Amino acid sequence: MRGNFHVRFGERGDETRRPQGRKVRLAPTLRSGSFLLGAYQFLLDYYLSWYLEHKDLRGFGNLGGLVRQIGDEWRLTIAEKKRILTTHIFGVDIDRQAVEVTKLSLLLKVLEGESTETLQMALPGFQERALPNLDNNIKCGNSLIGPDYFTGQLLPDADELRRVNPFDWEREFPDAIKAGGFDCIVGNPPYVRVGNVEEAFRPYLYRKYNVTHRFDIYIVFIQRAFELLSKPGLLGFIVPNKFFTADYGATLRKYLSSREAIWRIVDFGDSQVFKGATTYTCLLFLTQIPQEYLDYQSAFASEFAMAQQTSSAVRVDATKLGDAPWAFVDVKEAGLVDRLSPLPRLGTFCDIARGLETGWDDVFLLTVTSDVDLRGKVTVRSDAEPTPFKIERESIRPVVKGAVDVRRYSIEDKRRYLLFPYRHEGGKAYLINEDTLKGVYPLAWKYLMRHEKELRQRKGEQWYAFRRRNYDLLDGVSRLLVPSIAKRASFAGDPEGRYHFVGSGGGGGGGYGISVKPGVSVSIYYLLGILNSKLIDWNAKLINSRFGQGYYSFNRQYIEPLPIRPINFSDPADVARHDRMVTLVEQMLELHRRLAAAASEHDRALYQRQIEATDREIDKLVYELYGLTQEEIKIVEGE
């Protein structure tokens, strides 16, 4: 499964002493050993530089780690390269072939730059092996699973033992473990959701590492690696940055924050590090020495070397991090976050419902191509059939597809509809039984029957049911809609409760319906203005997952905790602010309707200017409602 790298140099302050090595590495997949090769090259360069700086302190002969080459070029002797390799570099991988390839790659690095003549000089008579034995350095085993996997079994099955391949760190690397752990651990753990991990291993991982049932395997690698780190050591992994905010990352956030283990984070955001794979990654550096503050730096992967030298890191108070989603903010921003935190959350005011997931949109998603005829029928088309067909208008519901149709303050109706084989009763949706559906909506039933074979491939309570029971939003209930991903907070009003979202969120399809809870007095338009403001957009992005091309997630976990300024309806000034917001939002909605209907470029520019002016008025009112200072306004507006 993966490997580690451990280095210890001379005592601090002893500038004349040759660096002394001890151990090295807990790597992820070794594959070709690229991480170990990089670590080994770093050590070779370090030792050579150290020798050259100190060769005059005691005389060259007492150091003995260099050989002079033609043209006054200094190089490490092969004996020294072997010593550095065998005392510093260690690795583990579950793939035996990867282990052998890594050994070969490291041995070739030992021979790099050598010739027959230099080998003869270094190894007179070849009494000494030219290459070291790396069996004690690079080993095959399961980094995450120890011998305790078989506790209670007197004699484990031989085939299962080979399949599991448990690894005993104390037995395999006794010197490092006795010394307190590895001084340096580097790697790239695998990014694999637990559903793709062999089922037999999962109970052990849940129990051993105290993780949730929806974790990614890299979460466990970080914990295991940290346990193997020495007190003054340093761990450096490249891992997905999603654990900062995702639900499944809560256990790791709690694990690291409770130990104050984070020294530094370099976040690549949506910049792509690995060719051919879309991953959102960061460099995570951990230490066993508690850190009151951590350095957080954003960087583009392609400009990381430059960013290292030119951009400054944000100093984050590590003591304020916990299992809640992490927001990496500087002291000034942290003050504003702290001031907003006591306010009630959006989830206090509203119910937030996820969009519909049919499990087979090609069949259920329809486009209406005609008006309703006298018999209540419409002509529709779907991706499941090449020819348009008629269906009962009452059997379908209008839908929208996330950011494709929903934008700030506006919804574009593209005549998308959903075949909806449900009835609402008592605020809930119930699947219509076959006999009733056949009698009430015969055309819809015939259409479903034509695609029964495809629909039965899905898992579910009934072959024509939707995949998930998250479709209980009533028609006619006033609500807000927000797409699952957007470049900024993009809430739209649906006062008539006309639309549902369809889609799982991928490709800009999914979204959420937000309806005011019973007993809540604030207008939905008041909420709409606040949620589309710069302040809430800034706040939402602090604890968010960023995707490619500048998109952010607006799933429930990110919008439910948004701070909402309550209104004291006993205070006339507060009521005036509430009503002022409602008026501005109604004006904004009308301007967007006129913009959509504008026939000329001149009119579109005119309405756009009015929209921008109204936006500024809304932001100004939000700053007043939340009591922001001029300094805090500058933070929100990025000045």
Image (cartoon, grey):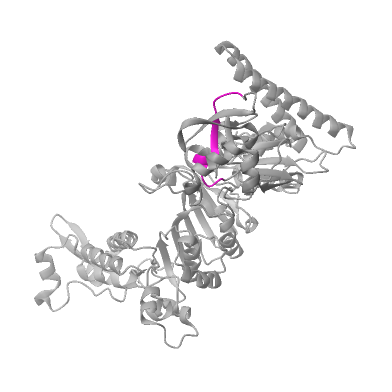
In the picture, measured across the screen, residue 553 lies left or right of residue 273, that is: right
Q: Residue furthest right?
A: 570
Q: Residue 24 location in percent, x, y?
A: 37, 69
Q: Position of residue 408 (x, y in %)?
A: 62, 30
Q: Please tell me which residue lies in front, 231 or 539.
A: 539
Which quadrant, please, contains the N terminus?
bottom left
Residue 231 in sight here: no
In the rendered image, residue 374 lying in the magenta stretch gets the answer no
Q: How many numbered marks are there?
A: 0
Eyeballing the image, is 362 above or below 174? Answer: above
In the shown orientation, is residue 407 left or right of residue 479?
left
Q: Is residue 538 left or right of residue 367?
A: right
Q: Is residue 76 above or below residue 123?
A: above
Q: Say if 258 sits above or below 532 in the image.
A: below
* The stretch drawn in magenta includes residue 360: yes
**Quadrant housing the C terminus:** top right
Q: Position of residue 278 (x, y in %)?
A: 42, 47
Q: Position of residue 113 (x, y in %)?
A: 17, 59
Q: Is residue 103 visible?
A: yes
> What span is in magenta?
358-371
Q: Depth check: 22 or 213 in front?
A: 213
Tell whether 604 sits left or right of 151: right
In front here: 598 or 25?
A: 598
Residue furthest out toward the bottom:
154
Q: Quadrant of residue 611?
A: top right
Q: Give whichever of 271, 347 is nearer the camera.
A: 347
Q: Would you identify the image quadrant in which residue 191 lies?
A: bottom left
Tell me what residue is drawn at x 38 percent, y 49 percent.
274
